[in-house]
Image: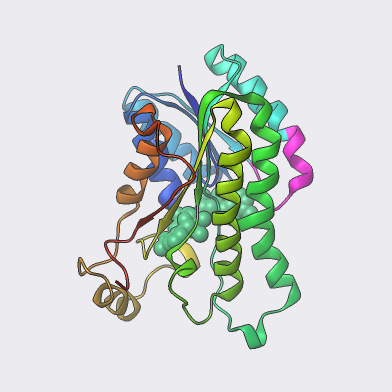
Amino acid sequence: MSVIVITGGSRGIGAATAVECAQRGMSVILTYKTNPTAADAVVRRIEAAGGKAVALPLDVADAQSFGAFRGTVQRTLETAWGATTLHGLVNNAGYGLYNPIETVTPAQFDGLMNVHLKGPFFLTQALLPLMAQGASIVNLTSATTRVATAGVAPYAAFKGGLEVLTRYMAKEFGERRIRANAVSPGAIRTELGGGLTGEFEALLASQTALGRVGEPEEVARVIAHLLSSESGWVNAQSIEVTGGYAV
Ligand SMILES: NC(=O)c1ccc[n+]([C@@H]2O[C@H](COP(=O)([O-])OP(=O)(O)OC[C@H]3O[C@@H](n4cnc5c(N)ncnc54)[C@H](OP(=O)(O)O)[C@@H]3O)[C@@H](O)[C@H]2O)c1
């Protein structure tokens, strides 16, 4: 029995990852922030296909709440699966913000930092005691860490921090045989940052070797692979899933 936690599992890449992991036989705890209806729909979709999932509320910007969240995860493991350990964590929840450096406010900066760097750091710390030997952590970063994209500087900088943090997680958790890898998507068709408008999508597609933007399921399959023992010797890596963006 493998139970994994996916933050931001109510929509986009997180929802697609929940469905993909369930199809591969994993049990899923997915979290949502504002959208319980969408989270429940993901749970029902997984159950309809014969899998099992539970949706829990979590604000990844609120590190103070992570101790209580660990308690909820522990109780959920016991009641839903008769289990005591987790086999995976996907630090996926996030949001985009377009604002050039000249006009970014401290509040905007802090908001992005809390969700994209501080949240994954302290959530991983909080859930570490529940992680089984051989567990796998996947952190969602972004191709904006490699290709400077005007208007998303704080977001990209924190994703870059998360990429570095991923290697430190791999280093420090290795003695418990816990792996950590980053998945770095390019432009994916989700609602992030208000979604892709036609003109913007065409521009991104023209900058991509395969000539289009990606779908959430294409990222989900890579995450699911990294969670599974099939990738047991892949550790401390950052893997771009972009169709060849800006190469
Ligand atoms: N889409 C892309 O092109 C792209 C590219 C590179 C990297 N990424 C990264 O991939 C990850 C997933 O993005 P996505 O495109 O799937 O986004 P999305 O479709 O907008 O979904 C975002 C998810 O994160 C949750 N969320 C947002 N803020 C949260 C918070 N403070 N606490 C807890 N949950 C929160 C949302 O929950 P509710 O709906 O319940 O509020 C939702 O489930 C993000 O880390 C993003 O930065 C995406």
Coloring applied to the structure: rainbow
Depicted 240 relative to depicted 221: above or below: below
Q: Nearer the viewer, residue 88 or 216?
A: 88
Which quarter of the figure has residue 187?
A: bottom left
In the shown orientation, is residue 206 left or right of residue 18?
Answer: left
Q: Nearer the viewer, residue 155 or 58?
A: 155
Q: Which quadrant, please, contains the C terminus?
A: bottom left
Depicted 222 relative to depicted 135: above or below: below
Which quarter of the figure has residue 214?
A: bottom left
The residue that appears at 67% across and 41% down in the rendered structure is 123
The residue that appears at 69% across and 38% down in the rendered structure is 125
In the shown orientation, is residue 241 left or right of residue 69?
Answer: left
Residue furthest right as drawn:
64
Q: Which of 130 and 111 is in front in this view?
A: 130
The residue that appears at 57% across and 75% down in the rendered structure is 153
Q: Which quadrant, please, contains the N terminus?
A: top left
Residue furthest bottom as drawn:
102
Q: Where is residue 72 in the image (x, y as percent from the top left)?
A: 68, 28
Q: Where is residue 100 in the image (x, y as percent from the top left)?
A: 58, 84
Residue 59 appears anywhere in the view = no
Magenta region: 58-68
Q: Position of residue 5 (x, y in %)?
A: 54, 34
Depicted 98 relative to depicted 186: above or below: below
Residue 33 magenta-highlighted: no
Residue 67 magenta-highlighted: yes
